[in-house]
Image (tube, rainbow, N blue to C red):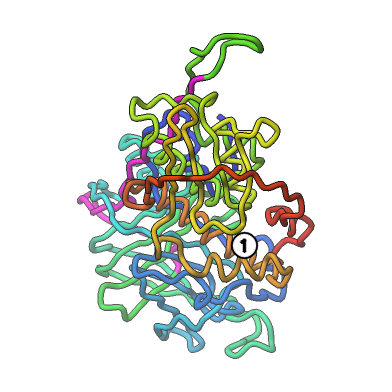
Amino acid sequence: MKYLNLFILVFVLLLQTAIGQSIPKVHAIGAMKDMGNTYQTKVWLDTLPIKPNMYGMGPYDRMKGEITVFDGKPFYASAFIEGKAVVGQSWDIRSPFFVYSNIEEWEEFEIEGPLNSIEVIQNKVAKIATEKGYNLKDPFAFRIAGEFDQMTLHIVTPRNSDVVGYKPDVKSQNFNLNNDIGQLLGFYSERHQGVFTGSKNFVHVHYLRDDLTFMGHLDKIQTNDRSFKLYLPKKKKIINTIIRVNDTDFSKGRLGNIQNIDLEDLAKFHGHFCDGLVVGHLALQQALLELYPDGVIDRTNTRIVSKPSPCLTDAAIYITGGRFQFNTFYVSSTMQELFTVQRIDTKRTVTVSMKAGLKPYEIDELGTLAIKGDLPSCELDRLKGLEDDFTEKLLTTDPKNNFTVTEITNFKWNPILKTDYLKTDILNKNKAKCE
């Protein structure tokens, strides 16, 4: 199995098999191992794509406490006075590293006690997730709800004298809770040790009391052998992205070489996997099925006009076989639609557009800044996160609801040769990493 990108892990196997299921992606900004001695913040939570279904965690500010975002509600806890925790709620907070996932629906399972260590929780969650068809190579969030007999939790405190709340030789405040009712929120990953999990385990777990008066990082736990409710992100069905094409069987051959092409094939041709490539692939899938209702696309009988985006033009060329030198492909910057596609033998022509409001406006807003070179490195990472979320939406919703195919008459094929379009996907190739 080859993975195209760390944040696209949930899709790769599914794309190879055409139809499958995915879980909501886990996003990580900053890393435990990179905090150093100054604990500089890497993310302002109010800059994240805030959604009512976000779950996340990280340190609060420069180790002033803990952050837990639960069902779109951002909680932060500090403990500057021994034995006293103060919990607030705001998006106007920051963190040196942060992990989050946007989860609309959860599947409920039972997890059997006793839960007597972090390792036990890790192993039991992994076992149930595996039994239910989750891939442990893909990071995921989980929740455990119930009454917990004994827990030891901590809230970190500042380690630098220039940070409010600093006390020499005090790095955290510990709290012992008994028979407490609430929920554990955790993130499981076998790939993020030193990023958002410790070096010796695969989970990072916080606790939020049901009455919202306490929140902290879980260190120790003891329970009896009763059952608890375990929640795992509900898997979404991946749509069928295969396009069947018909080509000649050799360089001077006959038509009849039918084969499948898919997003993974297109990504290898294009160079990377991205939302624009998915838009182009799915839009063309809908347009071509309109021209070839039997589901087999004759690439020797098709020509196409594309907007000049690198993603869209590569999708157009690869999927339809169109080439400028053979008068079957050209680019137009004046067209409003994504593509205009024509079946040569019948001259039947369709355009395909993405429905208004489908793509988050922030993607284009940040993309414009990136093209100008005005987007900082960390904001570039945020743009990628937004595009990944949009990709997930496209791959888990019916493309008929996302794209509009319109038949047009009296279309005039008018090839335009222009070679100075801006290749926007390479402009930031030497940008420094987010620090």
Q: Residue furthest front?
A: 410
Q: Main secondary structure of the magenta part?
A: strand
Q: Three-letter amino acid code at disc 1? A: Asp
The x and y percentages for residue 336 are: 50, 59
Characterize the local packing of mark 1: few (<14), some (14-19) or many (20 or more) Cα atoms within 10 angstroms.
some
**Is 152 or 291 nearer to us in this picture?**
291
- Would you place residue 247 above or below residue 253 in this image? below
The x and y percentages for residue 390 are: 46, 56
Residue 32 is left or right of residue 120, and the answer is right
Residue 208 is left or right of residue 6, and the answer is left
- Range of the magenta residues? 217-246
For image coordinates 67% across by 60% down, the residue present is: 33
| Residue that numbered label 1 is attached to | 381
- Residue 115 visible in the current orientation: no
* Magenta-drawn stretch contains 218: yes
Residue 61 is left or right of residue 203, and the answer is right
Q: Secondary structure at mark 1?
A: helix
- Residue 197 visible in the current orientation: yes
Quadrant of the frame with the C terminus: bottom right
**Is 141 or 213 nearer to us in this picture?**
141
For image coordinates 54% across by 72% down, the residue present is: 59
For image coordinates 44% across by 47% down, the residue present is: 351
Q: Residue furthest right?
A: 430
For image coordinates 59% across by 72% down, the residue present is: 43
**Is 255 or 411 nearer to us in this picture?**
411
Quadrant of the frame with the N terminus: top right
Residue 378 is left or right of residue 407, and the answer is right
* Magenta-drawn stretch contains 51: no
**Is 279 or 122 nearer to us in this picture?**
279
Q: Residue furthest left?
A: 226
- Would you place residue 156 above or below residue 248 in this image? below
